[in-house]
Image (cartoon, rainbow, N blue to C red):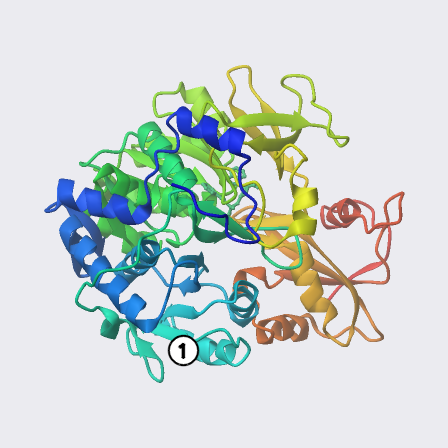
């Protein structure tokens, strides 16, 4: 069953699609059917635990059918875009599965996003609805919705989990299930993930039912999930790692139990691990450090944990070596990207492979190339830029033709921007990055996006944002700024960015004023030279610590 591709969404050439179907990767399932089928198979098993709420597969499926009826009655249709910005609450999964049933397309915003990002997602995708929580972690999302609603004419509904104020209460939408229009085709786009990106605005990543469900099945296999598995989601559920690697969706695929933690601090998470007998969870490297520290006195709470997945940013070999002795579970390194490709160390890999590599791809049909700056393949084992193509890696971003021409080769390989080498056993080691991005403990910051916001300040003549090495986060951000006249105080600039509605993790950690930027041979700003300045190398231009 196929239908014409969503306009603006590049897709796989038919020869590849046919091959992926023949190989049994794409099995013509959709998310809506999948949950229904699991409810029939595992009806009384617990699917989801969130705070006080416990939902069996049958309960979850029933709630999703009711909500799909409510969304349908509201006028939400197949292919309508709906920006979903929910914390780790059960409603997150009720909402997205209800949208999947209708073939409407969630756009997965992160709880940290603010007016700048949300306004852009709503406008760019011409979203018809925006789904939020009322308040979370001291922030009132209804205020954000007020701001965004005024700027986005297509937005018809703001739907709130909790106290809705002037908006539509999510709780009012659970209706008696009705006959719905036919659901989406398996080859249809199911939702949009967000790219960490390196450009002025985040790119949207169209993932299909076929390709994403394949990545779940592969992940479930590799991570050995089954109906006895208990997965803890401690990172924001919308992110690709806790969503699908194997994450909450993989846990549903396997018929296991997914537990949502409201935040990732040991005080919150360790008692949940103990109470729910959690077997597997996923963290970013800084969080692994915090948990390892806390485990010194509270390791008994982690007795059920069999696997700790660490990914999103590079884990040092030293830290990797401490995981098993400190937490008593197997480390699994995960090197993935919302665009597709995910690499895992295997649970039974030798210890040296687990601690010193970032794993190997899910699929035998994940094609990996490592190339030099001219796009030529390097010799085996040499370091270069990673390109990839495969059955769950997109062929292009949504409505981004010009960018796609650069981000993908003519024959469909995605330029990951990661610098890697491949070991003789086929494992990838991440050595660095060629993209203009800062990886702030797993949170991705596109330099250009922050630079553009800085340039909007009247006292800023030019700006260049670079990574500063950081013992805890791996990297933090530093903005080098050339002022017009007298430099403003750094906190004036950071307050300005906040006021423009930029997510907190993108606000520069440090601001340095300079007279001029060092240039490369071809006259571009040399970010390498700026990073060297921070590393203490002789400064090519006078730098004053503001
Ligand atoms: C995950 O996805 P994104 O889209 O937030 O970020 C992808 C980028 C990669 O291109 C790479 O630069 C970096 O994050 N990254 C890693 C890494 N895992 C991701 N760099 C070094 N070591 C690792 N283990 O971050 C993501 C998606 C699915 C699963 C896991 C992570």
Q: Quadrant of residue 325?
A: top left
Name the residue at the top extreme: 424
Answer above or below: position of 439 versus 347. below
Mark 1 close to ligand 1, CB under 8 Å: no
- In the depicted structure, whether residue 141 falls above or below residue 259: below
Between 235 and 258, the residue placed more toward the observer is 258
Using the image, determine if residue 511 lies above or below residue 391: below
The local secondary structure at tag 1 comes to helix
Q: In the displayed structure, does residue 518 sit left or right of residue 43?
A: right
Q: Residue at the far left: name it.
A: 44
Residue 113 x %, y %:
49, 64
- Identify which residue is drawn at 77% across, 50% down: 530
Residue at screen point 21% across, 41% down = 256
The residue lying at 32 percent from left, 72 percent from top is 74
Quadrant of the image for the C terminus?
bottom right
In the picture, the quarter occupied by the N terminus is top left
25 vs 17, nearest the viewer = 17
How many other residues sit within 10 Å of disc 1, few (<14), some (14-19) or many (≥20)? many
According to the image, label 1 marks what residue? 142
């Amino acid at each position: 069953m196929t239908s014409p591709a969503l306009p603006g969404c590049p897709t796989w050439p038919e020869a590849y699609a046919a091959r992926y179907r023949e190989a049994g990767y794409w099995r013509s399932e959709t998310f809506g059917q999948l949950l229904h089928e699991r409810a029939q198979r595992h009806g009384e098993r617990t699917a989801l635990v969130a705070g006080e709420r416990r939902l069996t597969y049958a309960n979850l499926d029933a709630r999703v059918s009711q909500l799909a009826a409510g969304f349908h009655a509201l006028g939400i249709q197949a292919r309508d875009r709906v920006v979903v910005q929910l914390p780790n609450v059960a409603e997150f999964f009720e909402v997205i599965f209800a949208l999947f049933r209708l073939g409407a397309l969630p756009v997965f915003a992160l709880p940290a996003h603010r007016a700048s990002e949300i306004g852009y997602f709503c406008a760019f995708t011409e979203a018809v609805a925006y789904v939020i929580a009322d308040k979370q972690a001291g922030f009132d999302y209804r205020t954000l919705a007020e701001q965004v609603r005024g700027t986005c004419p297509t937005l018809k509904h703001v739907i709130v989990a909790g106290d809705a104020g002037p908006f539509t209460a999510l709780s009012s939408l659970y209706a008696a299930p009705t006959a719905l229009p036919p659901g989406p085709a398996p080859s249809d786009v199911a939702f949009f993930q967000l790219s960490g990106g390196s450009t002025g605005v985040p790119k949207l990543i169209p993932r299909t039912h076929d390709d994403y469900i394949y990545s779940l099945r592969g992940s479930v296999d590799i991570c050995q999930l089954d109906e006895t598995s208990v997965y803890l989601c401690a990172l924001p559920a919308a992110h690709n790692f806790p969503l699908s690697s194997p994450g909450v969706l993989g846990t549903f695929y396997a018929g296991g139990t997914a537990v949502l933690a409201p935040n990732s601090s040991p005080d919150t998470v360790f008692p949940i691990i103990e109470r729910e007998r959690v077997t597997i969870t996923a963290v970013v490297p800084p969080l692994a450090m915090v948990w390892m520290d806390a485990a010194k006195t509270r390791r008994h709470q982690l007795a059920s944990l069999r696997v700790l997945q660490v990914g999103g940013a590079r884990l040092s070999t030293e830290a990797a070596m401490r995981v098993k002795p400190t937490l008593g579970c197997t480390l699994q390194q995960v090197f993935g990207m919302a665009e597709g490709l995910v690499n895992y160390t295997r649970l039974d890999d030798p210890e040296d492979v687990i601690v010193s590599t970032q794993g190997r791809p899910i699929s035998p049909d994940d094609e990996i190339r490592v190339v030099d700056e001219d796009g030529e393949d390097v010799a085996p084992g040499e370091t270069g830029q990673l390109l990839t193509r495969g059955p769950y890696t997109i062929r292009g971003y949504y409505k981004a033709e010009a960018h796609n021409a650069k981000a993908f080769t003519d024959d469909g390989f995605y330029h990951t921007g990661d610098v890697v080498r491949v070991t003789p056993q086929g494992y990838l080691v991440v050595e660095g990055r060629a993209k203009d991005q800062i990886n702030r403990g797993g949170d991705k910051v596109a330099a250009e996006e922050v630079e553009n916001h800085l340039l909007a300040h009247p006292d800023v003549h030019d700006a260049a944002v670079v990574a500063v090495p950081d013992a805890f986060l791996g990297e933090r951000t530093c903005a080098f700024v050339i002022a017009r006249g007298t430099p403003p105080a750094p906190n004036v600039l950071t307050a300005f960015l906040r006021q423009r509605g930029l997510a907190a993790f993108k606000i520069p950690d440090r601001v340095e004023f300079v007279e001029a930027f060092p240039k490369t041979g071809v006259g571009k700003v040399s970010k390498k030279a700026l990073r060297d300045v921070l590393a203490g190398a002789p400064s090519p231009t006078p730098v004053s610590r503001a």
